[in-house]
């Protein structure tokens, strides 16, 4: 409902605030301030107040933010107050690491389907899930109405996989392949690229 | 030399511009404009001009940016006009995926040392490198003067590993463990967290 107005850069910070609030809550904290939250995530208090105020008045002058209340609001805004099924394509080292990653369920995600193209990999189990043949991807993803995917295939195979995911109705893709990918305007894509993160830090090293 | 003045949020965008320029170059392009580069990375042309102008006058009115020249300048600013050695701690699925990742060398990084705590893993080879005992980490990293690390150990072990890396002189850490970590002010840390990326996209899905 806010999609037209809120800059994407603000949307990108909300999951960071949400993660910090969930960790504060796990430490037994009940309330926080924009200053404290800012120190936690490395963003200024003024920026945090401005970002959060885009969505309503969620804090009180003097007493700050209720952590459970703000957590609920951010989960609602980001639509992770429900469980999203996610498909993983490519079960090499990275795909296996993602399939076994422990940090999804409490953040609103459940790995639901696994695909690979290698006959030696198809049919194997990862946890409770069986790795399926990527030739079945479009039909299976469409029937299961899955909207999110993580792609961990070699760079040369990534565009074809992404095309099939789009055809199957996927709307958001997290790409681990070291390559640029084209998607239609109504599909979102994010790239996970360790070199980019490392380069951001080398700037600061003498 | 710019460290005191330039906001970190701008530094964080430079590797994204650099990656795009390197891909444009690989496609045979010689020049680009802030508009074209902006379309490529999803950032406004005005923001790109403002970011780049923090470091000098690298473009020409009317003709835009020379891709080789701007690439060299960004590599120099980010200090990746040299090769940085990187240590990986934790050789589970994720660590293996990182050790074998093909996208490091052309971006300024070389995986130089691997460590694990599991006796069944220590002594195994990944490519040309032998996985070493994490008990040797401080001495080995210090002797090799390595300043960058990627941490892919379980969450419960991550703080102790980070403490040892800091003791060994590491100045920048890329953390894949799903947990918050404390580092001194002179050490930089970035977190790779697939849930945060997915949550940024669910906002847009109806």
Image (cartoon, coloured by chain):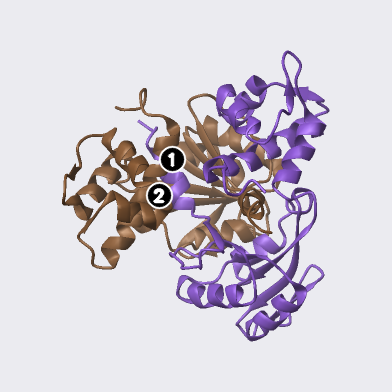
Chain colours: A brown, B purple
Question: As drawn, which residue projects farthest toward the top?
Answer: B62
Q: Mark 1 — on which chain does it sit?
A: A
- Which residue is found at the position 72% from the left and 80% from the top? B140
Q: Residue A16 carries which label?
A: 2
**Mark 2 belongs to chain:** A
Q: Quadrant of the C terminus of chain A?
A: bottom right
**Residue A18 location, x and y as percent?**
34, 50
Q: Which mark is residue A12?
A: 1
Front-most of residues B82 and B42: B82
Determine the image quadrant of residue A97: bottom right
Report the side of A160 relative to A127 (left or right).
right
- Whether residue A123 is visible to the viewer of this picture, yes or no, is no
- What percent of the width, then of the height, locates residue B125? 76, 75
Q: Which of B57 and B104 is in front in this view?
A: B57
- Same subunit: marks 2 and 1: yes
What residue sits 47% from the left and 46% below the top?
Answer: B197
Of residues B109 and A76, the one nearer the viewer is B109
Give the structural element (helix, strand or loop) at label 1. helix
Q: Would you call the spot at circle 2 few (<14 residues within 10 Å), some (14-19), or many (20 or more)?
A: some
Q: What element carries label 2?
A: helix
Q: Front-most of B32 and B168?
A: B168
- Per the model, the C-alpha gap separating discs 2 and 1 is 8 Å
Please determine whether, in this image, residue B164 is positioned above or below residue B81. below
Determine whether, in the image, residue B134 is placed left or right of residue A84. Answer: right
Callout 1: few (<14), some (14-19), or many (20+) C-alpha neighbours within 10 Å?
some
Q: Are marks 2 and 1 in contact (CB under 8 Å)?
A: yes
Q: Against B54, is A109 above or below? A: below
| Quadrant containing the N terminus of chain A in the rendered view | top left
């Amino acid at each position: 409902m806010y999609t037209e107005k809120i800059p994407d850069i603000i949307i990108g910070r909300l999951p960071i605030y949400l993660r910090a609030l969930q960790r504060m809550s796990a430490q037994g904290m009940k309330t926080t301030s924009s200053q404290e939250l800012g120190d936690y995530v490395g963003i200024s208090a003024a920026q945090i107040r401005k970002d959060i105020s885009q969505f309503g008045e969620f804090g009180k002058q003097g007493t700050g933010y209720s952590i459970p209340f703000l957590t609920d609001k951010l989960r609602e805004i980001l639509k992770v107050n429900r469980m999203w099924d996610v498909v993983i394509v490519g079960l090499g080292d990275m795909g296996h690491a993602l399939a076994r990653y422990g940090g999804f369920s409490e953040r609103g995600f459940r790995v639901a389907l696994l695909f690979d193209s290698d006959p030696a990999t198809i049919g194997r189990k990862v946890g409770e899930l069986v790795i399926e043949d990527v030739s079945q991807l479009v039909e299976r993803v469409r029937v299961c109405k899955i909207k999110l995917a993580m792609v961990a295939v070699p760079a040369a195979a990534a565009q074809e996989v992404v095309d099939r995911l789009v055809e199957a109705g996927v709307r958001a893709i997290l790409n681990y392949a070291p390559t640029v990918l084209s998607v239609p305007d109504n599909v979102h894509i994010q790239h996970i690229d360790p070199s980019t993160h490392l380069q951001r830090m080398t700037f600061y090293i003498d």
